[in-house]
């Protein structure tokens, strides 16, 4: 699976790595996993530097934002910091962050250290 989640018992930070081609259904499965395990309130650092989401259309991004809103409607979401490397991933990540702004703080970064500092500020 291209999206792997892990959390060290001594660290209050969820670390996720996305690699290879990520599909809409895999992103939905990731969101469902976060919800199912009650990880919505744990800050998360997502390394998507090796991920390819170039297949996501604007419609897909809107649908994923809507899916996330419906799934986590009752929950307060902790910050998510997304680290990207390509312009395509940067654009899609910023579009998603914009769509969920106001109820879920998603920061998009190119520098992992800056992303981790930001996400831990929550």
Image (cartoon, rainbow, N blue to C red):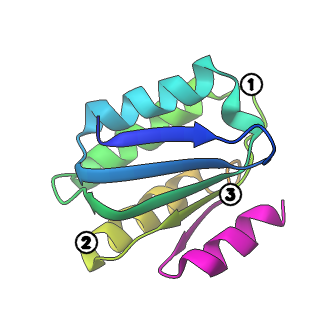
Which residue is labeled 2 in the image? 88
Measuring 46% from the left and 61% from the top, which residue is drawn there? 47
Is residue 59 found inside the magenta-colored segment of the image? no
Which region is colored magenta?
105-122
Closer to the observer: label 2 or label 1? 2
**Extreme top residue here?**
36
Dot 3 falls on a residue whose secondary structure is: loop
Q: Quadrant of residue 35?
A: top right
Q: Quadrant of residue 81?
A: bottom right
Give the answer, above or below, for where 55 lies relative to 67: below
On the image, the x and y values in percent for residue 49 come to 36, 68
The residues tagged by marks 1 and 3 sit, at their Cα atoms, a distance apart of: 16 Å
Is residue 119 found inside the magenta-colored segment of the image? yes
On the image, the x and y values in percent for residue 52 come to 22, 59
Q: Which is nearer the N-term, disc 3 or disc 2?
A: 2
On the image, the x and y values in percent for residue 104 come to 67, 50
Q: Is residue 9 left or right of residue 98?
A: right
The residues tagged by marks 3 and 2 sit, at their Cα atoms, a distance apart of: 21 Å
Q: Is residue 98 left or right of residue 52?
A: right
Which residue is labeled 1 in the image? 74
Give the answer, above or below, for where 32 lies relative to 114: above
Q: Any mark on residue 105, and which?
A: 3
Q: Is residue 70 visible?
A: no
Q: Is residue 16 left or right of residue 93?
A: right
Q: Are marks 1 and 3 in contact (CB under 8 Å)?
A: no
């Amino acid at each position: 699976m291209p999206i792997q989640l892990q959390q060290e018992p001594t660290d209050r930070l969820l670390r996720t790595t996305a690699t290879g081609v990520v599909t809409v259904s895999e992103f939905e499965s990731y969101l469902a996993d976060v919800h199912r395990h009650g990880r919505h309130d744990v800050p998360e650092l997502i390394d998507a530097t090796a991920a390819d989401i170039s297949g996501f259309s604007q419609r897909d991004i809107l649908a994923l934002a809507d899916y996330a809103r419906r799934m986590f409607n009752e929950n307060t979401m902790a910050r998510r910091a997304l680290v990207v490397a390509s312009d395509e991933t940067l654009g899609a990540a910023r579009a998603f962050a914009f769509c969920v702004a106001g109820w879920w703080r998603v920061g998009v970064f190119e520098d992992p250290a800056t992303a981790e500092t930001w996400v831990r500020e929550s």
